[in-house]
C-alpha cells in the first residue's frame, strides 16, 4: 500500500515472552526472513509467486505451537483458526488434511511455480531479482524531477511494491482530487495502449503509481515501461496543465 518494509527484525527481543506475528504477504520470496524472531508468519500464493489470491500459508514456530497448546480462548473460534485437538496441535493440518477441499488446480499451479523458482536458482535468485528490479525504478525516480519515491527512507523501501508520488509543482498545486485525476489519466492512457494495467497508487496515498517489481517480473519489462511513463506524463500534462 505504501511501498515500505521493516528493514530488519532487530527491534524484536530474542528473549521475548510473547509471540511475534508477521504478515509477510509481500515479503516472502523477495527478502530474508529472520526466522528466530518470527513465531507466526503468513503469506499468500498470490504476491511473489503469482498464484491464486484466496490461498495462503501459515508457518508456526515452537513458541507459537506452545501458545496454541497452553491457551484456549473463552470465545468461539472460526473453524479455520482451530489448530488444536484435545489440547495438542492438530498436526494433520500440516500433513495434507484439509478443512475444506481446495482447488487442486491452484495447488498444482503453486507447486509448478515453486519448481520454476528452484530451477532458476532458488530463493536467493528471487531475492536478488527483486532487488535488481526495484533498483531500475529507484534509479529512474532519482533522475526524474516529476516523480519521487513515496517511501522517503531508503532502508525502508520495499523491493516488491514500489510506490511513487507525482511531485511536479504544476500537479501538486492542484486540489487533491485533481491530482488524483491526473495520475489516473496516466494509468488509463497506458492501459488503453496495452502497456500496463492497474498500477495507480492506493486511494489513500498521494497521487502516483504502485508498480510491482518482484522476482516474477522481467527487468527488461520495467526498463521498457519507463519511456512509456515519461510519454504518458508529458501527454497528459500537455492536455491538462
Image (cartoon, helix red, strand yellow):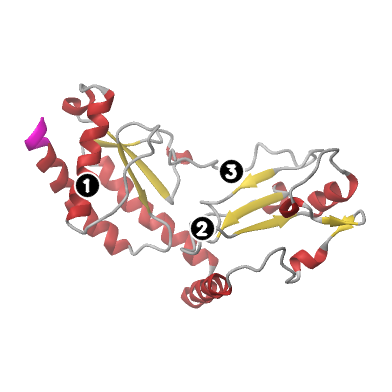
Nearer mark to the viewer, of 2 and 3: 2
Say if mark 1 contacts mark 3, CB within 8 Å. no
For disc 1, the marked residue is 188
* Quarter of the view holding residue 221: bottom left
185 with respect to 159 (left or right): left
Q: On screen, 210 above or below 126?
A: above
- Which of disc 1 and disc 2 is earlier in sequence? 2
Q: Secondary structure at mark 2?
A: loop
Residue 114 horizontal/vertical position (percent): 54, 72
- The mark nearer the N terminus, 2 or 3, is 3
Residue with the mark numbered 3: 8
- Whichever of callouts 1 and 3 sits on the residue coming sooner in the sequence is 3
Q: Residue furthest left?
A: 238
Please report the bounds of the magenta region as a residue range.
237-241
Question: In the picture provided, is 24 more to the left or to the right than 200?
Answer: right
Look at 80% across and 43% down and name the residue there: 76
In-image side of 182 versus 159 (left or right): left
**Element on which disc 1 rests:** helix
Q: CA distance from mark 2 to mark 3?
A: 26 Å
Marks 2 and 1, how far apart at CA: 24 Å
Task: Determine whether label 2 and label 3 are within 8 Å by CB.
Answer: no
**Principal secondary structure, stretch drawn in magenta:** helix
Percent of width and height locating residue 22:
64, 46
Local crowd size for mark 2, using a 10 Å CA cut-off: few (<14), some (14–19), many (≥20): few
Q: Which residue is mark 2?
A: 53
Amino acid at each position: 500500500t505504501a511501498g515500505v518494509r521493516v528493514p530488519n527484525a532487530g527491534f524484536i527481543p530474542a528473549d521475548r515472552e510473547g509471540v511475534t506475528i508477521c504478515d509477510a504477504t509481500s515479503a516472502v520470496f523477495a527478502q530474508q526472513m529472520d526466522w528466530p524472531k518470527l513465531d507466526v508468519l503468513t503469506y499468500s500464493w498470490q504476491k511473489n509467486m503469482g498464484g491464486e489470491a484466496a490461498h495462503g500459508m501459515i508457518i508456526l514456530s515452537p513458541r507459537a505451537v506452545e501458545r496454541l497448546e497452553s491457551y484456549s480462548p473463552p470465545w468461539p473460534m472460526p473453524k479455520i483458526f482451530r489448530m488444536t485437538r484435545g489440547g495438542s496441535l492438530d498436526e494433520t493440518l500440516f500433513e495434507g488434511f484439509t478443512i475444506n477441499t481446495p482447488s487442486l488446480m491452484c495447488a498444482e499451479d503453486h507447486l509448478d511455480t515453486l519448481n520454476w523458482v528452484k530451477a532458476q536458482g532458488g530463493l536467493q535468485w528471487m531475492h536478488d531479482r527483486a532487488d535488481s528490479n526495484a533498483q531500475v525504478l529507484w534509479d529512474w525516480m532519482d533522475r526524474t524531477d516529476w516523480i519521487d519515491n513515496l517511501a522517503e527512507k531508503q532502508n525502508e523501501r520495499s523491493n516488491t511494491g514500489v510506490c511513487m508520488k507525482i511531485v511536479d509543482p504544476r500537479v501538486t498545486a492542484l486540489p487533491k482530487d485533481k491530482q488524483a485525476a491526473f495520475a489516473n489519466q496516466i494509468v488509463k492512457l497506458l492501459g488503453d495502449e496495452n502497456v500496463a494495467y492497474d498500477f495507480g497508487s492506493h486511494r489513500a496515498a498521494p497521487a502516483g503509481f504502485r508498480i510491482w517489481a518482484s522476482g516474477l517480473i522481467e527487468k527488461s519489462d520495467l526498463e521498457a515501461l519507463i519511456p512509456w511513463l515519461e510519454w504518458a506524463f508529458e501527454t497528459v500534462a500537455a492536455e491538462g496543465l
